[in-house]
Amino acid sequence: MEFYDQAAYRQADDDQYEPLLAAKDETTTEVDSSLPDDLTRDELELPSLAEPELARHYVRLSQQNYGVDSGPYPLGSCTMKYNPRFTEDVAALDAASVHPDRSAESVQGTLALQHDLQDYLGRIGGMDAVTLQPPAGAAGEFAGILLADAYHEANGEGHRDEVVIPDAAHGTNFASAALGGYDVVEIPSGDDGRVDVDALDAALGENTAALMLTNPNTLGLFERDIEDIAEMVHDAGGLLYYDGANLNALLGRARPGDMGFDIMHFNVHKTFATPHGGGGPGAGPVGVTEDLAEFLPDPHIRETESGTYERYTPEQSVGKVHGFSGNWLVLIKAFAYIDRLGDDGLSDASAKAVLNANYLAEQVDYDVPLGPFHHEFVASAGEQDAADVAKRMLDYGVHPPTTKWPDLVDEALMTEPTEVETKDNLDDLADAFNAVAGDDDETLEAAPNRTTARRIDQTSAARNPRLSWHDLD
Amino acid sequence: MSGRERGSPYAPHTDEETAAMLDAVGVDDVEALFDIPESVRFDDDYGIDAKSEQEAVTETRKRLRRNDDLTEFLGRGHYEHYVPSLVDHLSQRSEFLTSYTQYQPEVTQGFLQALFEYQSMLVELTGLGVANCSMYDDATALAEAALLAKRVRAADGDRVLVPEYVRDGHVSVLENYTSGADVSVERYATDAGNVDTDALADTIDDDVVLVYAENPTTTGAVEEHLSAIGDLADDHDALFCLGSDPVAMSLLQRPADVGADVVVGDASVLGMPASYGMGLGVFACREDFLRQVPGRLVGASEDADGNRAYTLTLQTREQHIRKERATSNICTNQAWVALRTAIHAASLGSEGLVNLAERMVELPRDLAADLDDLTGVRAPVHDRHHFREFLVHTDQPAPAIADDLEAEGLAVHAVGDHRLQVCVTDANEHAADRLVAAVAEVTH
């Protein structure tokens, strides 16, 4: 197994890998304005670099960064696919970038694209109506909670104040339910890693507003009892919410709407290949069944009888979850991706994502306790510390999996290779896993050695927060 | 390209590879790997035809081409400045664009440092101790500020006060985000485009957790009573949250100097075109609130070689660890937009920012004077200094004027029966004379 230097640009100057902009220049500009002095600040001190120096600064920073285009990025639950670049070009068109207050008559193209993306997502999710407004997955969850809240309120069931969530769910589910003012009822997973139907039964009741479920769940397992689960939740008067983080496993094969879900969000930066951008922007469109469509955020887009498009406020709209219309440029990229792949490509994406996960799991020496999994698997690092395993994998030139979560698996290595890796890449990835599996604790704890920075002291970062260059010596 | 005729163009498997992998997994057909009960299988298709890249580009472009090519004099909280080419070229580098949240800081130092530098610029602009590395937009940032105020205040309180000029949509976001926290959002009066401090003094009491004001306001006025607002908030142990943006803060009173406890706003005025309202939420606050801050924070630390290195820090505030007790539900944020904003700010530098901001004072002054010369038009409506935009009184009905201007290829806001709002920046000043001539034409 060879080692690779990756994201390893170094210019160790004064103990920094790349000096801060502020270390290169800080120019103080006295503010001289036509405004009265008491309405202005006195001065501003920021770096003022010539363009060539600035270009080099950011190019060096980019060289210290690892992305999907750098190599395999099997970060579980994040669906780090290749991001096709033609979508960047269409999002950069001048016509994509109109002001949000333009009249509907003058932005028929934007409205047409919004309408058609609503339509595409509705077909893919098996949902009757879709809003594009939520700017990320968590924002979609929150919008879903608002919708459930409005629905129950309208039905005279405003007393429902509990949201049931399995313990292995994404942290955002809990936080989004709490943001909406709901009490979270956490239910333990069964030994097989799926929803424990008895525990669910015990948790459901007259106060249940919704169950939030990821399917396949964060262990990559399909909730086989989904129809029973849906019936139980609906019998209790609750709604079923689908967390779309793992939709990449189901394209062309199953739809949340057909499984009985009432509300769902899509993570277009996962399933539909829009770039993750170092942490965002994403987009989190929300689909609903017919019964919930009248509560969707304002404005919604529809086609008129004359073939034009209009904005309107759904009858009992929950209002807004973003100042304008969400992360529009991201949504354009998602539309272009879906339109390019079509049925055939989307279905194949899921097939290859699931094949890749299964193939990689087969090649990895670490134990994978639960299955059959789909687009991701959770291996156990066993006696090793999963966080150390991740650091050591960096030395082998790959991005490691998500670690230590979900808790159901000891020292979890949550691995999602996506459909974009070749067999050779997967073999290399497996070699990296297996080489690390054979490393001793001392080696693991000393890793990484071949990255830009070596192991970073998290404790001192948190104990002595230095959050801007003003806090540095 | 895999050269395959079918399937995803971004799944590179050859048929031979697929066969070898299936063999290794021990199944004949990939469908055997899907553990989905027959009763919930989707047997149909979506009805979306696969396309070549060229066809897909054409399809998206075809739709967008239906947009009218108007010169926009639109603002009301969302603004556009010229974005230097360098911003596109650097931010599009794959290593930045295709990475994700910096869970492995040893291989993401570049993005972490860029975000640290973004935070640092916001700290300099606001004068406050802490800035996070992004919220979605100004509306959600304001909502998070209200929730922070509720958390940090020693005594209970349930009122949030916002001025009349705030957009209805932004108030709706604020109401939604605070609906679970038993907070009521109330509007307070304004006077000639600024906060009416007497009205604010009358309505504020000890149940108020947060007072919001803007500089400049959504209608473009420079706020002249910031210190008085800060004092009123302070008297009642309420937080003063100021809405602004990085260009305005380069010139106008420094938020920390007027008693602001939290600053929110849209930083995408640097780095992004109008983008149909896609934004970058600023969130900066006093250092005392550090452990209650929503969203991600990048901190400096050292690595095993003793060199400075950056990492996400204080993550125990966040949803992936604290779950329902997190300070916010935010996960994916606007990091890449923050990168673009930082590059744009750095390319302007302090002098460039101050100069740009000063032009945002002069351009509306000049345009308002030109419009004021027209018969039946009065501008600006309020006797204030303005930043980027201002209100215009028209004797004739404003909506009809706006429609007529649109037919002339110019977009302005009609915000009342006889009131327009006009925004002028470096992005559209080239057409300012054309706007004046068109207004004269349609109102004569």
Image (cartoon, coloured by chain):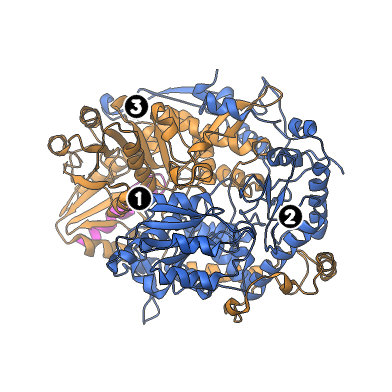
Chain colours: A blue, B orange
Instruction: Identify the residue at horizontal 24%, vertical 60% (top origin).
Output: B441
Bounds of the magenta segment: B424-443
Which mark is on residue B177?
1
Q: Are marks 2 and 1 in contact (CB under 8 Å)?
A: no
Q: Is residue A262 magenta?
A: no
Residue under pointer 3 = B256
Mark nearer the N terminus (3 vs 1): 1
Q: Nearer the viewer, residue B140 or A391?
A: A391
- Marks 2, 1: nearer the viewer: 2
Residue under pointer 2 = A368
How far is disc 2 from disc 1 in space, using C-alphas? 40 Å
**Residue B371 in the image: above or below residue B47:** above
Quarter of the view holding residue A21 = top right
Asked whether, in this view, residue A123 is left or right of residue A152, the answer is: right
Say which quadrant the N terminus of chain B sits in: bottom right
Say which quadrant the C terminus of chain B sits in: bottom left
Q: Amino acid at mark 2?
A: Val
Q: Amino acid at mark 1?
A: Tyr
Provide residue A168's location: percent of width, then percent of height.
57, 53
Element type where label 2 sits in the image:
loop
